Amino acid sequence: MFKHDKALLHEVKVDCPNPNYAAMLQEQLGGPQGELKAAMQYLSQSFRIKDKEIKDLFLDIASEELSHMEMVATTINLLNGHNLDANNATIGNIEAHVLTGLAPMLSNASGQLWTAAYVNESGDLAADLLSNIAAEQRAKVVYEYLYRQINDQGVRETIDFLLNREEAHNTMFREAFNRLQDTGSLKDWGVTQDSKLYFNLSTPGDQYFNANNPQPPKFNSPNQN
Ligand code: MN
Ligand code: MN
């Protein structure tokens, strides 16, 4: 069950309308690293999870991603303003200018429509968690690009908040992954000789990468046990 709370997760504001910035921010509304993708990915993955704590984590984060989506869409709406004169928009999401009357739409910054093909779902908790860790990392990178390119203090404060929340999700998914050792697709990790081979196929030169005994991935930070 989902409920709607009238308050935004975090207040959003803009210094002034700017349709170009609105078009850029569309990337995190309906793009492959955006908030709708994150929400749908974690929600759809959660249906298969048996571990109650991890299922709860996925649903909590999916719900928060919908709150992020609401914040991004609200910011885009403020940046577009309610004046349908789009003369200032010279690049980006032309579709929003000619099709939706500048309403925030489910597309990326170039107007390409959102697709469920962005959602990665494997039925294997280890594979899904690794997808989610990478998704959070990519979302952070896109927000960093947007932060550099959007010179609006109000929007930057929103981006900064969202960027830090993606870091928090990333950390929680890593923590969940660390609990999974030797389960699912990790269960028989590295038990055959073939799984321990490293082919040095770069010539000429020495082998720079030393991989005599590769280990399964672990994300424990140095100050964790
Ligand atoms: Mn998010
Ligand atoms: Mn996130």
Image (cartoon, grey):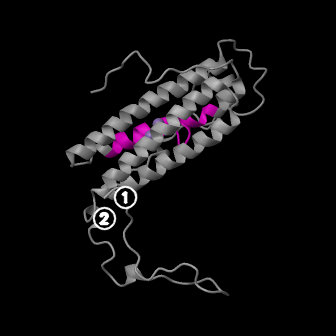
Mark number displayed over residue 220: 1
**Amino acid tagged 1:** Asn
Q: Position of residue 223 (x, y in %)?
A: 37, 56
How far is disc 1 from disc 2 in space, using C-alphas?
Answer: 19 Å
The span picked out in magenta is: 25-45
Is residue 29 among the parts visible in the rendering? no
* Residue 53 in the figure: left or right of residue 161: left
The residue most toward the top is 83
Residue 34 magenta: yes
Q: Which residue position is annotated with label 2?
A: 185
Q: Residue at x 54, y 28 (%)?
A: 72
Q: Position of residue 100 (x, y in %)?
A: 61, 21
Residue situated in front as seen by the camera: 45 or 147 = 147
For label 1, the SS is loop
Quarter of the image with the N terminus in it: top left
Among the 4 quarters of the image, the one containing residue 169: top left
Among the 4 quarters of the image, the one containing residue 216: bottom left
Main SS, magenta region, reads helix
Q: Residue at x 74, y 15 (%)?
A: 85
